[in-house]
Image (tube, helix red, strand yellow):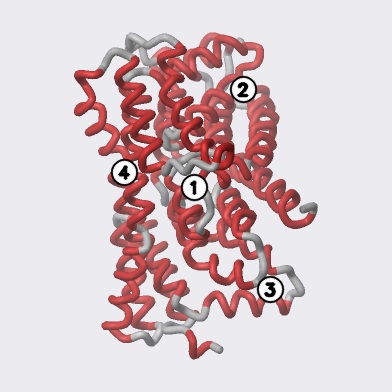
Amino acid sequence: MEAMYSFTTLGAVIGLALAILLIIRKVHPAYSLILGALVGGIIGGGGLTTTVNTMVSGAQSMMSSVLRIMTSGILAGALIKTGSAQKIAETIVSKLGQKKAALAIAVATMIICAVGVFVDIAVITVAPIALAIGREADIPKESLLLAMIGGGKAGNIISPNPNTIAASEAFGVDLTALMMKNAVPALCALAMTVLLASMLGRKGTLGVSESDIDDTNQELPGLLQAILGPVVVIILLALRPIAGIAIDPLIALPVGGLLCTVVTGNAKKVVEFTEFGLSKVVGVSVLLIGTGTIAGIIKASALQYDVINVLEALHMPAFVLAPLAGILMAGATASTTAGATIASQTFAPTLLAEGVPALASAAMIHAGATVVDSLPHGSFFHATGGSVNMSIGDRMKLIPFEACVGLTSTIVSVLLYMLLG
C-alpha cells in the first residue's frame, strides 16, 4: 500500500522538522516551509522533479483560499481604519462594566475576531481599552492579556478568518456551516477564559503603568454604523443554510468592508483602507503558499498510512486523528492558519475514507489548531505580548493557560461531534 505514495514518512517528517527549526531560527516561515518541503521530498525518495511538481501542486491547491483571504482584507481594513472595531469593543466593555472586566474584554475580542478580524489584530485593537480598564481597576496584565487571547481563540473558530477558510476548502464544506459548527465549543472556551483570567486577576503581579496607556484618541463612528458591515457579512453568509442562496466569502467579505467604509463617512478613503487591509493579509497569503508546498509533500507521503496504523495499534478510533493533527501542526508552525491548513490538506482524504464526517473533521482540526498555536517561534506570541508591553519571560508564563482554553474547545468539539453525536 505504501507504493501508492510518492514520498516516505521519514522524508516528510524530516522536511517538517527542518521547517520548524528554520522558523525557530527566525527564517521567514514561508521560506522555511518551502525549503523543508524541498528537502523532505528529496530525502523521501521522490527525486527533484517529482518533489518540485508536488510542491507546486500543493501551492496551487491554496489559491482559492488565498484569493478569499486577500479579499477579506477589505473588511478587516475597514473595521480597523474606520474605528468600527474599537467602537464595538468599547461598547461591549462599557455595557458589562469593570466588575465583569475579564468577561467584557474576552467577549469584545471574541466578537471582533468572529466578524473577520485576524486574532492578533483583534488583540492589538482591544489592548488599549483593556489596559485603561486594568489601570483604573487595578487588574494585572496577565489577566488582561489572557482574557484577550482566550476571547480571540473563541472567536477564531467561528470566524471567516484564513484558518476557517482553509479548513472549509480542504474538506469541501460550506464556510458558514463550519463557523456555526464550533459555536458551542467557542462558548465553552470563552467560559474557560473568563475563569482563568479571573484567577490571574487575583494572583497576577504585573500592574499596568501610566506609560502603558495609549492616549491617542480616534473619532469613532456610532454603534449602528460600526456593526452594519459585519452584520451584512453574517447575513450574506447565512443565506446559504437558511435560504439556499450561496454567497461566496469572496463576495460577502469585501461587500461588508465597503459598506462599513461608506456608512462611516469614509467613502473617499476606500483606496487607502483597502490598501491597509491588503497589507494585513499579504503575510498570511504568502504563508499559505509556503504551507501548501509542505502540505503537498506530506499529503503525498506515507505519513497518513503510518499514522492510521499507529492509531489502530493503539486501538484508538480514526477521528482522534483530526484534533491531534490540528494540535501538532499548529504547534509545529506556531500558527493557527498554517496548522489548520497543513492538517486539513494532509489528513482530509484519510479522515473521509475512514468514515469521519467532513464537517466534524474540519471543526475538530480547527479547534485543535488553537491549543498550542502561540508558541515563541510564531508571530502571534510576540505581537500579543507587545500589545501590553510584556516581556518574553512573562509572556511565556501564559502559554499553559492559553493551551487550556484551546484544549477546552477541542475536547468539547470531540465530545459533541464524535462521542455524543
For disc 3, the marked residue is: 311
Q: Earlier in the sequence, mark 1 or mark 2?
A: 2
Q: Earlier in the sequence, mark 4 or mark 1?
A: 4
For disc 2, the marked residue is: 102
Judge whether residue 380 can be spotted in this image.
Answer: no
Q: Position of residue 391 (x, y in %)?
A: 44, 34
**What residue is rendered at 48% in x and 28% in y?**
112
**What residue is rendered at 33% in x and 9% in y?**
219
Q: Residues within 10 Å of mark 3 (few under 14, many from 20)?
A: some
Mark 4 or mark 2: which is in front? 4
For disc 4, the marked residue is: 70
Q: Which residue reaches farthest right?
A: 420
**What residue is rendered at 54% in x and 30% in y?**
110
Q: Alpha-carbon distance for marks 4 and 1? A: 14 Å
Q: Alpha-carbon distance for marks 3 and 1? A: 26 Å
Q: Residues within 10 Å of mark 1 (few under 14, many from 20)?
A: many
Q: Residues within 10 Å of mark 4 (few under 14, many from 20)?
A: many
- Asked if marks 2 and 3 touch (Cβ < 8 Å), the reply is no
Is 128 left or right of 400, judged from the image as shown? left
Q: Which amino acid type is marked by label 3? A: Leu
Work out whether 45 lies above or below 52. Answer: below
